[in-house]
Image: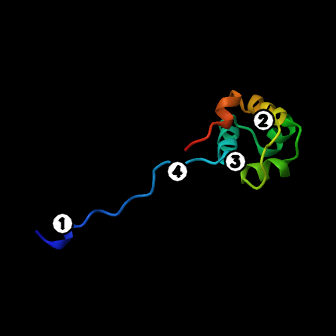
Amino acid sequence: MTAATLTRPARRAAANPPATFGATVARLRRRRGLSQVVCAQLVGRSETWLAKVEHDRIPVDRLSVLRDLARVLGVDLATLIEVVP
């Protein structure tokens, strides 16, 4: 055997890295076919606010806003705030 056959293959990055809250919101919004503008309006917020949420620059820390966001995205609240370890 050669040294090349004895070495372990390089580890590959995880196929599905854990999603952040913002990435989850963006994915669900796109799945519903909503633009940031329309989604933000339906939640009663600005497009800038939604962009910051989707990029994890600001948290959504009010239950009422989380509920509105879940309703607009067509998911239950638990699905929206599910934390991936």
Cα distance, mark 3 to mark 4?
14 Å
Q: Position of residue 67 (x, y in %)?
A: 78, 30
The residue positioned 72% from the left and 54% from the top of the image is 55
Disc 4 element? loop
Q: Mark 3 to mark 2: distance in Å?
A: 12 Å
Q: Position of residue 22 (x, y in %)?
A: 70, 47
On screen, residue 10 above or below 39: below
Please give the name of the residue rendered at 81% of the width and 32% of the height, measured from the top-left corner: 68
Q: Earlier in the sequence, mark 1 or mark 4?
A: 1
Res 10 → quadrant:
bottom left
Amino acid residing under circle 2: Leu
Which residue sits at x=18%, y=72%? Answer: 3
Give the residue number, with chain letter if any, for mark 2.
Answer: 66
CA gap, disc 1 and disc 4: 29 Å
Distance Cα–Cα, label 4 vs label 2 = 23 Å
The colour scheme used here is: rainbow
Q: Which residue is mark 4?
A: 17
Q: Earlier in the sequence, mark 1 or mark 2?
A: 1
Crowdedness near tag 3: few (<14), some (14–19) or many (≥20) residues, C-alpha within 10 Å: many
Q: Name the N-terminal-most of marks 3 and 1.
A: 1
Q: Which residue is mark 3?
A: 22
What crowding class fits label 4: few (fewer than 14 Cα within 10 Å), some (14-19), or many (20 or more)? few
Instruction: State the SS at label 1.
Output: helix
Query: What is the three-letter code of the residue carrying label 1?
Result: Thr
The residue at which mark 1 appears reads as: 5
Q: Identify the element where label 3 is drawn.
A: helix
